[in-house]
Image (cartoon, rainbow, N blue to C red):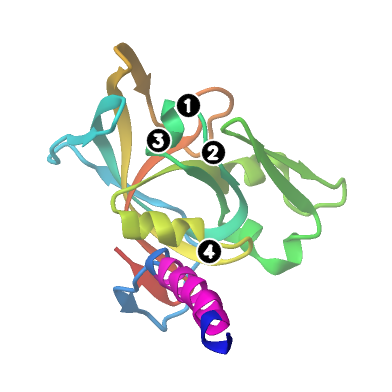
Amino acid sequence: MGKKWYFRVIGPVLILCFLFACSRPHKSGFDSEEIDTSRDPIQRSASSYDPIVIQKKDGYYTLTPVAAYELAGKVVSKETYWFGWESDLSPLDLAIAWGKLAETEHEKYVSFSQTNRWYFYEYKPECPLDNDYILSHSSNNHIIPATENISLAVKGVGKHEKVILEGFLINLKGTYKGGEVYWNTSLSRKDTGNGSCELFYVTKIRINNDVYE
């Protein structure tokens, strides 16, 4: 009787532990240097890079790099998406702030939220940072992970954690269930409205001191 109970309990526990371990990202490196969230994103021409082709169950997509991109900052909001062809490529958005906006002392003045692939911010009248500064030092990033490991790492990012994301801003064209689709990135940190978010193909991410590729 005791042995049967033992195997009935321990068996499922071992399975759950195995599945949990498989769903955790594997670190590819460690960097003890403090992440500098004060600097602006680094954007360079990506004209020499070849398009990236992604095949999914119901779609076929060509991603054209238009800029090599590196973003260091603090996560101020995260939203996960489950429906639509976009979520098959980009399962989540990260709203990230840098410069003075990433400093802890300004958290009490500015709040961020996300919905339907948009991000929003509100700031108190006494905020020492004006609207133009907040706009130009924060961005909503549609994350397309280059690997499953990066996907797992990004999904584990928490609010207020410091990150460095590297990869490409891309324009996308493809077919989904027989219909044509497209999705383009912003190349400016100062634009607003539809099309102002970054479509970010991430090839490497650092979360605090841990690096994932």
Q: Residue at x 38, y 26 (%)?
A: 184
In the image: residue 167, left or right of residue 11:
left
Residue located 39% across and 31% down the image:
185
Residue bearing the label numbered 3:
88
Local secondary structure at mark 1: loop
Residue extending farthest to the bottom is: 2
In the rendered image, residue 34, in percent from the top left (x then y), is placed at 47, 78
Circles 3 and 1: CB atoms closer than 8 Å: yes
Specify whether residue 78 is painted magenta: no
Whole-number angstrom distance, CA of label 1 to CA of label 2:
8 Å
Q: CA distance from mark 4 to mark 2?
A: 29 Å
Against 50, is 33 above or below? Answer: below
**Horizontal placement of 194 versus 63: left or right?**
right
Range of residues picked out in magenta: 5-21
Q: Residue 32: x percent and y percent?
A: 41, 84
Q: Residue drawn 73% across and 51% down?
A: 129
